[in-house]
Amino acid sequence: MPSVFLKTYGCQMNERDSEQVARSLLDRGYQRASSEKEADVILLNTCSVRDLAEQKALRKMMNLRALRKKNPEVVLGFLGCMAQRKGESLEKEMKGLDLVVGTQKFHRVADLVDQARVARREGKPRFLADVGEEEGSERTIRDHTLTPKQVTAFVSVMQGCDMHCSFCIVPTTRGKE
């Protein structure tokens, strides 16, 4: 059974998005890895509100690429706000990256991960990016990964914002309200 390690940077919305991604991968037959070293797939759900958060995620991914020496089939991907903001430019910035998935495409992560795993297994890795806007994607935010004794969970009230305040990146990274 393939395993996935998912690390989240940033806000509660990112935590919620990671829960959705984890649920879709568990439903697809993946299991959660307790560390990056044990994982077949490593996904970093990223933040773009502050440059420091982006730099942490980029440094982490640079370090994770070393795992390919032991396991050349490990799939590495960025999700979330930084992935949305930087998009396909991350391929040039980060050699060996398998996927970049934006904030309106979390419901497609399991399919993209499966495609990336097949490509790596066949020795023909390719870069997959899905960061476009998708009308109605907010309706795909449903599933959680909850433990039996868990009494709290993040709930998504809205996905983006239409205000475009001069100081805020949310409309750029999260899309329309």
Image (cartoon, helix red, strand yellow):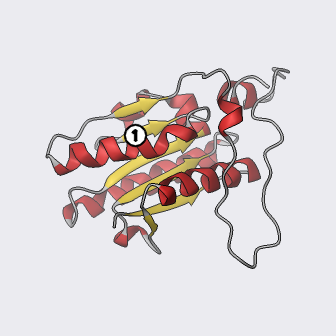
SS for callout 1: helix
Image spot of residue 91 (x, y percent): 36, 33
Q: In which quadrant of the rendered image does the N terminus lie?
A: bottom left
The reply, left or right, for residue 137 in relation to residue 119 is right
Mark 1 neighbour density, 10 Å: few (under 14) some (14–19) many (20 or more)? many
The reply, left or right, for residue 15 in relation to residue 91 is right
> Can you identify the residue that label 1 sits on?
112
Depth order, front residue of 139/73: 139
Depth order, front residue of 28/56: 28
Q: In which quadrant of the rendered image does the C terminus lie?
A: top right
Residue depicted at 36% across the width and 33% down the height: 128
Kind of residue indicated by mark 1: Leu
Is residue 137 visible to us here? Answer: yes
Is residue 97 visible to us here? Answer: no
The reply, left or right, for residue 171 in relation to residue 91 is right
Residue depicted at 73% across the width and 47% down the height: 13
Residue 172 sits in quarter = top right
Tell me: residue 68, above or below residue 161: below
Residue depicted at 78% across the width and 45% down the height: 156
Tell me: residue 70, above or below residue 55: below
In the rendered image, the residue lying farthest to the bottom is 149
